Image: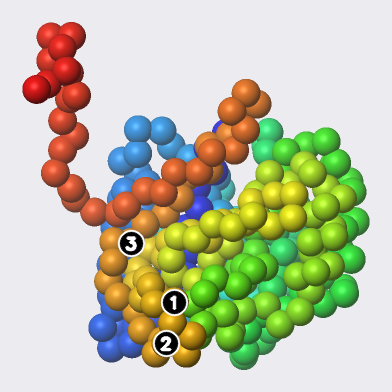
Amino acid sequence: MLIGQITDTHIKADRRLVYTRVDTAAALERCVAEIMRLPQRPDVMLFTGDIGDYGTAQEYALVRQILAPLAMPVYLIPGNHDSREELRASFPDHAYMAQSPKFIQYAIDDYPVRIVALDTAIPKKSAGELCEERLGWLERTLAQAPDKPTILMMHHAPFSTGLSYMDGIGLVNGTERLGSIIDKNPQVERIVCGHLHRTIVRRFHGTVASICTSTAHQSVLDLEPGATPMFKMEPPGFQLHFWTREMGLVTHTVAIGDFDGPYPYFMDGKRLD
Ligand SMILES: [Fe+2]
Ligand SMILES: [Fe+2]
């Protein structure tokens, strides 16, 4: 099973630039083109939030339009820049959103890897939370399929990164309880997140938690406490989580863009010198 992940597209209405500078609509178009030219087409795409920049119907209409060439199912969760109500209204054909009336969280059981999505958003706030209601749902949901390899998706990451501004708008609670739920559910192969606008990986209890590159702008890598929050147009990307029973879940980060190559390593059976 090949699971694609895109995150933090921050689409604005009328293709307006984000922070007066970032053409996020063009960035998502390049991402979709990159996905379409992959040698292997992902079976599903996970979209880990900050889909729009203000969470409006116009933004989501543009997202729909740009994602239209993708034929595979796309599973959405809200980030802090999204609106649950507008997401539900704008993606009425995404039936999985109806699994929970309050939060946009759900389980998808149709594939060899089970997908469980957890909603960390707090309306109109940048930080995220994991309240007892959401964690209770997660505990019950994971208990339904304890033997099936599972990927858990959430917008905010359950760990600090050293990027102090971003850490300041991380999860305000619930990570300890999430950890104890993960400890009891070794079938969770991975927690995949967004929000940080960088590729970051950390051990989290009995699993691995990973954060995917944004399709648009990235956070500046400065680990000084109190560093000024800045973004940079480092190469955008997305991730491919490749699962087979033999290999387990392996993640590849794909850079979006036109690069020199490919070139062969070998010619006439000999390594090129
Ligand atoms: Fe974001
Ligand atoms: Fe975010």
Which class describes the residues within 10 Å of circle 3: few (<14), some (14-19), or many (20+)?
many
Mark 2 — residue? 227
Front position among marks 2 and 3: 2
CA gap between label 2 and label 1 equals 7 Å
Q: Residue at horizontal 82%, vertical 77%? A: 131
Mark 1 — residue? 223
Q: Residue at horizontal 54%, vertical 71%? A: 161
Q: Quadrant of residue 93?
A: bottom right
Q: Nearer the viewer, residue 32 or 3?
A: 3
Q: Secondary structure at mark 3?
A: loop
Contact flag, marks 2 and 3 (Cβ < 8 Å): no
- The circle drawn on residue 112 is none
Mark 3 — residue? 236
Residue sitting farthest toward the front: 224
Kind of residue at disc 3: Pro
| Quarter of the picture holding the N terminus | top right
| Spot occupied by residue 147 in the image (x, y as percentages of width and height) | 83, 36
First along the sequence among labels 2 and 3: 2
Contact flag, marks 2 and 1 (Cβ < 8 Å): yes
Q: Nearer the viewer, residue 222 or 28?
A: 222
